[in-house]
Image (cartoon, rainbow, N blue to C red):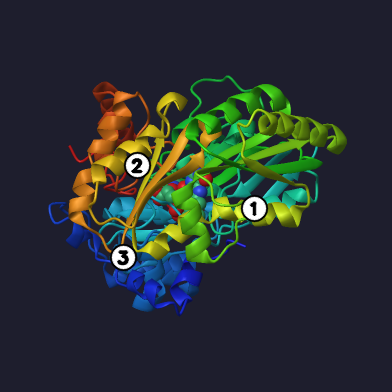
Amino acid sequence: MQRNILTRLLSSPCPRLQRYKSVSLTSEQYPNLKRGDFARLQDSDVQTFTRILGSGNVLTQPDDVEGYNTDWLRTVRGQTRCVLKPKDTEQVSEILSYCNERRIAVCPQGGNTGLVGGSVPVFDEVVLSTSQMNKILNIDLDSSTVVAQSGVVLEALDTELSQYGLMVPIDLGAKGSCHIGGNVATNAGGLRLLRYGSLHGSVLGIEAVMADGQVLDCLNTLKKDNTGYDLKQLFIGSEGTLGVITKVALALPPRPKSINLAYLSLKSFADVATVFRRSRADLGEILSSCEFIDKECMKCVTENLNLSNPLGQSEFYMLIETSGSNPTHDEEKLNNFLENMLAEEIVSDGTVATAPSKQKEIWQLRERIAESLLVDGYCYKYDISLPLSVFYQAVLDMRQRLGDRVVTRCGGFGHLGDGNLHLNITTPNYDQEVMDLIEPFLYEWTSKYRGSISAEHGLGFKKRNFIGFSKSAPAVMLMKKIKQEMDPHGILNPYKVLPDF
Ligand code: FAD
């Protein structure tokens, strides 16, 4: 369903989409940013890469590399002249060892669905794409674990596991394109973190290639292993700056036998918060997702993508999913909960979908919001963690600050159950005045309430200089020391995660 969203957007004849084709070069958008002291690619380098990978796996034609230079949001564009597509760990190791020696900067790339500009080069870094490292290596039914190469597409992995009654403990709107290695590299959260926890818990092991080509084998499939520092955790969320993740071992939950999805409309955010609190208490162990959408984002996804909303116009909407093993018990529990919410007039209207096809239709309204925002033009995308008490105030205060400044929309949606708000502002084209109204105001606002300026998308290129709003100076200093130790020449994803200063 979500496969190749970018391709679909680019091939659409819709004239409103045509303007995404001309994304300014990152180096022009950020003229003060200086290229690092890295080697420039020579013909001899391409010859070496070709020797290691074979000619079909080294792309150098401008048309072939174009898609690897531009991010999913179409907001940043690098100038790589070379994309490398290794098939296994040994090839990654040989490439990095060579690049480290030659001081060639490398940008690791998975499915290129990242939303903070981390997956594309800033200048002319060589792109190392994991798209050909797409083998599922072992599924162990006794321990419910899987070992896979990092380039396996999330949806493909989940589909394979479904045959064994298992599932990947992470799900997100980009599942048809993002890679499991990219998910781990960004510590992606997604739609069911509320139930299955973060990847820091479900990743059992990692194999990664360090900047100098050394292979770090932390590929455990054990649930318990307290032998020294847990090094794999360093790579989870490191966004390609500490090593290239080549293999991942995951603990897998059983695939639920019964899934129900309640889709609700509500009058106020206070009601949304009440429903969330009550759903946790009343649905308990079967609650698997709690998402919310405001009126503005619902309008965007229905109008821009021509989707229909089975409930009428409302200020807010919620998706509450339950997953369990006993359909009768789960349905009864959910229905009781909803009857109470309706009787107490906390929920205005609602519907429960039990059929997978109906559930898919409703999930589209939530999962395709990111895609629909791009149709407006330029999207200023924020992903913050906040306490529930001030959660939606961020959108209201931002709207007030933007005032009558010409903005197409300012709305919120996201993973309410995880305290994670996706705040989005759109304008027909990039507008520096709008940007100046948003940043650093929103980061200061978030920091005031002890929130996180990046809940799940990471810092990548765009947010790295704001790390100080969420992390102390000594913590940032320690991160820099770790980077220096693991990548002394700074060849891995330069200009990402760590601040310039
Ligand atoms: P890429 O975008 O290719 O790369 C992301 C970062 O990881 C880059 O810094 C890159 O250098 C690094 N990287 C990639 N692969 C490797 C590797 N093998 N080794 C080392 N570094 C690597 N994110 C969420 O957290 N939750 C969501 O619910 C969510 N929903 C989304 C919905 C849509 C429609 C879209 C477009 C994006 C969404 N995202 C979400 C963001 C994005 O999908 C995730 O960050 C995803 O995990 C990125 O995976 P990827 O394979 O596309 O990585």
Look at mark 1 in the image and give the residue it sits on: 362
Q: Report which quarter residue 61 is drawn in.
A: bottom left
x, y percent for residue 371: 47, 59
Q: Residue at x 80, y 37 (%)?
A: 331
x, y percent for residue 472: 28, 23
Question: How far is the residue under mark 2 from the one under mark 3?
Answer: 21 Å
Which label lies toward us, 2 or 3? 2
Which label lies toward us, 1 or 3? 1
Q: Earlier in the sequence, mark 1 or mark 3?
A: 3
Question: How far is the residue under mark 1 from the one under mark 3?
Answer: 39 Å
Who is closer to the viewer here, 271 or 252? 271
Which label lies toward us, 2 or 1? 1
Q: Earlier in the sequence, mark 2 or mark 1?
A: 1
- The circle drawn on residue 459 is 2
Would you say residue 173 is visible in this rendering?
Answer: no
What's under tag 1, amino acid-wise? Ile
Q: Secondary structure at mark 2?
A: loop
What's under tag 2, amino acid-wise? Leu
Question: How far is the residue under mark 2 from the one under mark 1?
Answer: 30 Å
Q: Report which quarter residue 279 is drawn in.
A: top right
x, y percent for residue 52: 45, 64
Q: Residue at x 47, y 35 (%)?
A: 420
x, y percent for residue 364: 60, 56
501 left or right of 144?
A: left
Would you say residue 161 is visible in this rendering?
Answer: yes
Look at mark 3 in the image and give the residue it sits on: 80
Q: Residue at x 74, y 37 (%)?
A: 323
Q: Earlier in the sequence, mark 2 or mark 3?
A: 3
Label 2 environment density (alpha carbons within 10 Å; few <14, some 14–19, many ≥20): many
